[in-house]
Amino acid sequence: MPDEELERFEKINLSEFAASRGYALDRRESSRNSAVMRHPNGDKIIIARNEASGDWMYFSARDDRDNGTIIDFVQHLDGVSLGRVRQILRSWLGSPHQLCMFVKDLEPVSRDRAAVVAVWERSKNCFSLPYLTNRGLGPDVLLHPRFSGRVRVYHLKDEDGEVLFYNNVAFPTMTRAGCAGLRSKTRDLPALLRAASRACGLATPCRPTGNLSLWKAALTP
């Protein structure tokens, strides 16, 4: 039987709640459908809204297993029981808040799309990788202003957090709303490899210079 109180909690603006816990919005990395927030202790989370339910959800950039709704966020942050979570969120709903550095709303996305953004945000910029250099994508390309920050590497982990593949290279498919999908050499989770049908553009936007595709050079054996 649905728990109406928990369902109501999941509609709380998680970005605003995170701001009350010391997280601040990173406007440069955020988009209209995802908010990247950082804590002074080094923690980083990606927040989105589920288009299927309207619930706010988050993904940790440090721990693949740390994700979910505001309920999971409070439990992970405070290490408390569900009963205590209810008390905390009831108090939150019943109190006025004067905060800044958060987003008031986000365009809802699928959970798969939000997971893609989370993987992209967890990834590190790639400046040199033998696999890519052998395919003509050396540091001269990866460090070029047009492509810097658009090729990244990440460690693919299983459900228990064990690393399956190190330095898995990822290329984003981009829309005006941000990262919409990833293409990767490793056969990853289907959701993480699914490219949005209208997504395009690996290079940083600038004046038209013609069409250029790097994916085949990078991903074809």
Image: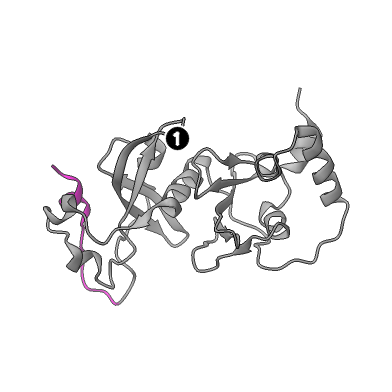
Label 1 secondary element = loop
Please identify the quadrant where the C terminus is shown.
top left
Residue 18 in percent (x, y) is at: 68, 55
- The part of the image, by quadrant, that contains residue 22 is bottom right
Q: Residue sitting at 24 percent across and 71 percent down?
A: 144
Q: Is residue 39 left or right of residue 175?
A: right
The residue closer to the viewer here, 171 or 194, is 171
Q: Residue sitting at 66 percent across and 67 percent down?
A: 101
The residue closer to the viewer here, 65 or 92, is 65
- The part of the image, by quadrant, that contains residue 33 is bottom right
**Please, which residue is most extreme toward the front here?**
41
**Please, which residue is most extreme toward the right here?**
94
- The part of the image, by quadrant, that contains residue 70 is top right
Secondary structure that dominates the magenta span: loop
Q: Is residue 28 left or right of residue 10?
A: left
Let me know if residue 34 is in the magenta part: no
The residue closer to the viewer here, 219 or 167, is 167
Crowd class of label 1 (few under 14; some 14 to 19; many from 20; radius 10 Å): few
**Please, which residue is most extreme toward the bottom here?**
207
Please identify the quadrant where the N terminus is shown.
top right
Give the labeled residue for mark 1. 161
Check the image and report above or below for 44 versus 111: below
Q: Is residue 194 visible?
A: no
Check the image and report above or below for 120 versus 80: below
Q: Is residue 154 visible?
A: yes
Which amino acid does the dot numbered 1 rest on?
Gly
Residue 100 in percent (x, y) is at: 70, 68
Residues shaded magenta: 207-221
Residue 133 in percent (x, y) is at: 14, 56
Q: Is residue 189 left or right of residue 5?
A: left
